Image: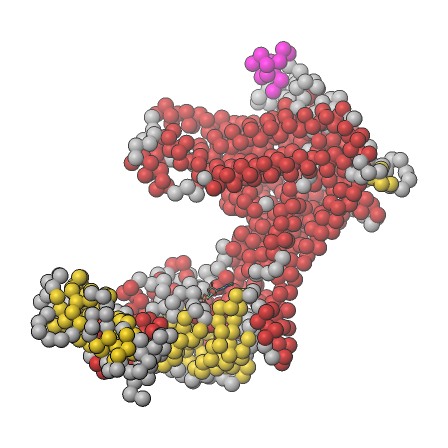
């Protein structure tokens, strides 16, 4: 087990820069998730850690050793590919034992670790099958098994669940969490799905357009997003953002309502679950019309339109007794307002 | 990548650029044997061959080669055999491609349907493609020979010729012998290529057309042909070039005779080089052939880009 | 075709007739070749145009196998096998580079390869003759092997590229992460998966080399190094009388091609379409 350090990492293809100024330290045994929209450079970063892409600039260290020039086989890492990359001409057992085969470990010595990994992953009965005779979930398990058998310094995952259907994805997500708990290996996990990121990570790295936006624990990112991009990316449904003009005690919204905000704020974010909904009455607050209601059973999403302010989504617990087109008053949980400045950066509250 | 490299401090850069060099060199390493062979055995001789076209160069008339400018081309202009060969090239190529294509399309459409014994039929009808050219040529000269072949009797039975004689021996008909052999040999090629393209047409399209009320003929003209068109153009182009260059059948079946009546440009190149060892003259003909083919390819590619844009 | 639904019986009959016609057209010349090859000498003329010989014999084959043809045959086997093997190895390297790497100059190389497929090969027959002669290699088999190898590399390279393209890059990367050098990854993972492709390439190149004739005529003029086609042609012009033996020789020439053809059947469509699109 070893930590991974990236300092000043950059990557260009030809003249096009796809990653820059990436600084990140993954601690021993830590589970770090790289998350960001498609094309932001997550896979590229992971592949540079694996040694599959040359590093244009900066330094990569694994277990304290500089790795920039070390070929993949010298880095002692395991990787699970989105396509699983199982060798089609080898059985499950041989696939899982392949790293040891390459290391010239005798056959007898290989059987034990392979059997144990198969046990853990519930692959015991499938060891003699070929990959083409496996289902998607089983292939996924074999790919993980191949990584486990290796006992590497670190695990790398590149969107391992994105080829599975929704139910299986949840199941495998739990499986990965369980495995990490059991093995405690250093892991870098790439996904574009923020739910996977929130549920699996010790720490999340949010990336956009080739740059790291914020690094933090899931609750850090949820409670204190560093900028509007992170605010919009983490949390589901997406955070509401309203713009306003600064007045002495906060921001005045287009309809005249004033929400408290620190100096320098130009916009306020509020998560749907932190927006209180009351039937229109005498109380002061942001007036809006309910345009669409989604009943999820446990929760209800109310898509509202506040004249001049824009669309706002509120999420309330249980069901509501409201009709489409009815008028409501929206009040934010004041402690949960996220102020952002003109550049979209978080403005520190409380000074 | 290099732009970013120059920004990095010296120390890192040295190591990086070595890794970078390795990355750059690797594919060239794998390509090297191919490039050496192609360069040495095809491209270099090509350049030399182009040079011969402007030299007086005959192995039978000793003495150093000398540059003579366009003399070889002037000789060609005045050479009635050249013009005959040019005409024959058009007939040979045009007739061969047309017949091969028509036969191949028919066969591909048939093979694209369902029937019993398809695998066997497919293997049998594609077999001519595997027959070595010289053997195809010999077989057809034997078939056309009234002493041991039946074809002359069929032709006279059909009233195409008055009595069973060898059409290869008659300057008026001789060219059709190699053309027949070429069609036999080339139909499978078109059939295989067209079959691959046909099976790539999604069957939903035919189902949708059927639901829309199209007849079999309509779905052929409205779906099959438009889908095949770009691929047909490119295949026909490559095949035309290939056939125009294809001298083996003619050389083996008639040697260009009788009385040069079946000489096409490429077989004429070969006879000139092989029998007369007149490399200057042969190369000049080759250059003309190359130029004609390039013009032809340019025209067809223009047509194709219009088809694709539509 | 799905659109035809349930076709008319007359159409079905027409279809089978047309197929039968194609099969007859394809097979008749070969049948004739075999027929004369097994006809006894004394019947060749009297039954020259009979469709079914009244007697059959292996004599012609026996005589051919006892003659110079055996040597021609051997020369051809040496040339074709060497050409196929060398071409497959070299083209596999090139195809791999084309499939797996993006490098500056790739388009240029690819254009050069295409160019070699476009120009009349006969344009280089004179220069090649001169080069081979000046190297003192006229009348040797290696001169043919090198020439044929070069001629076949472009097509074989594109063919191999299309096979490599069909193998996900992830597999090699996984292998390299699992501890392989690139060479080990190639040997343990990529090679087993490309075996069919290599086989197809071998088949195509073998067939091409087996039937080449013009360069063989130009470069080989001594009997002892003649390839089969050249020997057969020589035979035709020298004693154009012994039909039975010639046909028997012809049938023998057909055997290796047919073997390879049976082998590459499965890859025909894939190979030719990639060839047609790319080169
Ligand atoms: N080989 C390549 N050449 C040029 N650009 C590339 C290459 N690979 C990836 N890119 C570019 O790098 C960016 C990041 O890609 P990637 O890391 O795959 O994104 P992600 O995994 O986050 O979706 C993309 O804009 C992509 O177009
Ligand atoms: Mg990705």
Q: Tell me how the rendering is colored.
A: secondary structure
Relative side of C218 to C203, left or right: right
Relative side of A334 to B209, left or right: left
Up the image or down, C33 lies above or below A165; here it is above
Residue B124 locus on image (x, y percent): 52, 34
Residue B158 locus on image (x, y percent): 56, 14
**Residue at x 49%, y 55% (from the top left corner):** C166
Question: Can the viewer see residue A286 in this picture?
Answer: yes
Q: Which residues are magenta?
A: B151-163
Q: Is B161 in the magenta?
A: yes
**Residue at x 33%, y 36% (from the top left corner):** B209
Residue A37 locus on image (x, y percent): 38, 67
Residue C93 locus on image (x, y percent): 62, 58
Question: Could you say which is closer to the camera, residue B69 or residue B269?
Answer: B69
**Residue at x 71%, y 52% (from the top left corner):** B39
**Residue at x 33%, y 38% (from the top left corner):** B207
The C terminus of chain A lies in quadrant: bottom left
Q: Residue furthest right?
A: B63
Up the image or down, C4 lies above or below A235; here it is above
């Amino acid at each position: 087990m070893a930590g991974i350090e990236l300092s000043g990492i950059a990557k260009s293809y030809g003249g096009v820069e796809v990653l820059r100024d990436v600084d990140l330290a993954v601690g021993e045994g830590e589970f770090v998730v790289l998350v960001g929209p498609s094309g932001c450079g997550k896979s590229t970063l992971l592949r540079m850690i694996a040694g599959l892409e040359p590093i244009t600039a900066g330094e990569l260290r694994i277990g304290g050793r500089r790795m920039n020039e070390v070929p993949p086989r010298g880095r002692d890492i395991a990787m699970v590919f989105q396509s699983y990359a199982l060798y089609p001409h080898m059985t499950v057992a041989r696939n899982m034992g392949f790293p040891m085969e390459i290391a010239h470990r005798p056959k007898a010595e290989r059987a034990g670790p392979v059997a144990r990994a198969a046990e853990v992953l519930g692959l015991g009965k499938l060891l003699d099958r070929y990959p083409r005779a496996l289902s998607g979930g089983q292939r996924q398990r074999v790919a993980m098994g191949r990584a486990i058998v290796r006992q590497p310094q670190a695990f790398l995952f590149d969107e391992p669940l994105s080829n599975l259907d929704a139910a299986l994805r949840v199941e495998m997500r739990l499986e990965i969490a369980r495995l990490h708990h059991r093995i405690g290996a250093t892991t870098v996990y790439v996904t574009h799905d923020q739910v996977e990121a929130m549920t699996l990570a010790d720490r999340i790295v949010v990336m956009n357009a080739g740059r790291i936006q914020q690094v933090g624990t899931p609750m850090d990112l949820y409670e204190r997003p560093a900028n509007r991009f992170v605010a919009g990316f983490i949390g589901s449904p997406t955070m509401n953002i309203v713009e306003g003009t600064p007045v002495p005690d906060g921001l005045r919204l287009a309809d005249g309502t004033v929400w408290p905000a620190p100096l320098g704020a130009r916009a306020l974010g509020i998560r749907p679950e932190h927006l209180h909904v009351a039937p229109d009455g005498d109380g002061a607050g942001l007036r809006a019309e309910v345009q669409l209601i989604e009943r999820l059973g446990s929760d209800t999403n109310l898509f509202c339109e506040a004249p001049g302010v824009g669309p706002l989504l509120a999420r309330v617990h249980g069901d509501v007794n409201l009709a489409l087109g009815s008028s409501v008053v929206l009040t934010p949980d004041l402690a949960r307002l996220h102020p952002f400045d003109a550049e979209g950066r978080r403005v520190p509250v409380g000074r | 990548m290099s732009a970013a490299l120059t920004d990095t401090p010296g120390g890192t850069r040295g190591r990086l650029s070595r890794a970078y060099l390795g990355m750059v060199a690797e594919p060239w390493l794998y390509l090297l044997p191919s490039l050496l062979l192609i360069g040495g055995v095809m491209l270099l001789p090509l350049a030399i061959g182009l040079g011969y076209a402007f030299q007086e160069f005959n192995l039978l008339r000793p003495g150093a080669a000398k540059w003579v400018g366009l003399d070889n081309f002037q000789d060609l202009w005045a050479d009635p055999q050249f013009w005959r060969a040019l005409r024959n090239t058009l007939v040979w190529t045009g007739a061969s491609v047309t017949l091969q294509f028509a036969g191949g399309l028919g066969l591909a459409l048939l093979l694209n349907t369902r029937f019993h014994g398809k695998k066997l039929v497919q293997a049998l009808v594609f077999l001519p493609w595997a027959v070595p050219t010289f053997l195809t040529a010999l077989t057809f000269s034997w078939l056309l020979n009234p002493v041991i072949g039946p074809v002359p009797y069929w032709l006279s039975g059909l009233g195409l010729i008055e009595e069973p004689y060898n059409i290869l021996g008659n300057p008026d008909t001789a060219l059709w012998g190699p053309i027949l052999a070429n069609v036999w040999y080339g139909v499978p090629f078109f059939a295989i290529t067209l079959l691959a393209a046909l099976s790539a047409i999604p069957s939903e399209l035919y189902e949708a057309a059927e639901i829309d009320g199209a007849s079999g003929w309509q779905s052929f003209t409205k779906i099959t042909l438009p889908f095949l068109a770009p691929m047909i153009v490119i295949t026909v182009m490559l095949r035309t070039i290939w056939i125009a260059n294809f001298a083996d059948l003619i050389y083996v079946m008639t040697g260009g005779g009788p009385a040069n009546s079946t000489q096409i440009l490429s077989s004429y190149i070969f006879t000139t080089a092989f029998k007369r060892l007149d490399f200057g003259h042969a190369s000049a003909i080759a250059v003309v052939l190359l130029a004609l083919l390039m013009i032809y390819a340019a025209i067809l590619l223009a047509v194709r880009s219009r088809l694709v844009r539509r | 075709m799905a659109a035809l639904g349930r076709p008319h019986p007359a159409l079905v009959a027409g279809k089978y007739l047309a197929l039968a016609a194609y099969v007859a057209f394809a097979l008749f010349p070969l049948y004739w070749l075999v027929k004369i090859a097994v006809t006894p000498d004394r019947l060749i003329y009297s039954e020259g145009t009979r469709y079914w010989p009244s007697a059959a014999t292996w004599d012609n084959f026996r005589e051919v196998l006892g003659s110079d043809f055996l040597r021609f045959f051997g020369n051809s086997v040496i040339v074709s096998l060497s050409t196929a093997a060398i071409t497959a190895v070299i083209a596999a390297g090139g195809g791999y580079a084309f499939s797996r790497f993006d490098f500056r100059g790739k388009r240029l190389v690819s254009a050069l390869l295409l160019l070699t497929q476009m120009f009349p090969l006969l344009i280089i027959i004179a220069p090649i003759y001169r080069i081979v002669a000046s190297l003192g290699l006229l009348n040797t088999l290696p001169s043919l092997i090198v020439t044929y190898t070069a001629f076949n590399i472009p097509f074989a390279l594109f063919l191999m590229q299309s096979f490599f393209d069909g193998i996900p890059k992830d597999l090699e990367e996984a292998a390299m992460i699992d501890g392989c050098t690139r060479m080990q990854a190639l040997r343990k993972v990529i090679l087993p998966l490309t075996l069919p492709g290599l086989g197809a390439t071998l088949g195509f190149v073998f067939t091409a080399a087996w039937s080449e004739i013009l360069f063989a005529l130009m470069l080989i003029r001594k009997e002892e190094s003649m390839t089969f086609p050249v020997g057969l042609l020589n035979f035709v012009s020298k004693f154009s009388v012994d039909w039975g033996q010639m046909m028997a020789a012809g049938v023998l020439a057909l055997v290796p091609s047919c073997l390879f053809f049976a082998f590459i059947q499965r890859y025909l469509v894939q190979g030719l379409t990639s060839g047609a699109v790319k080169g």
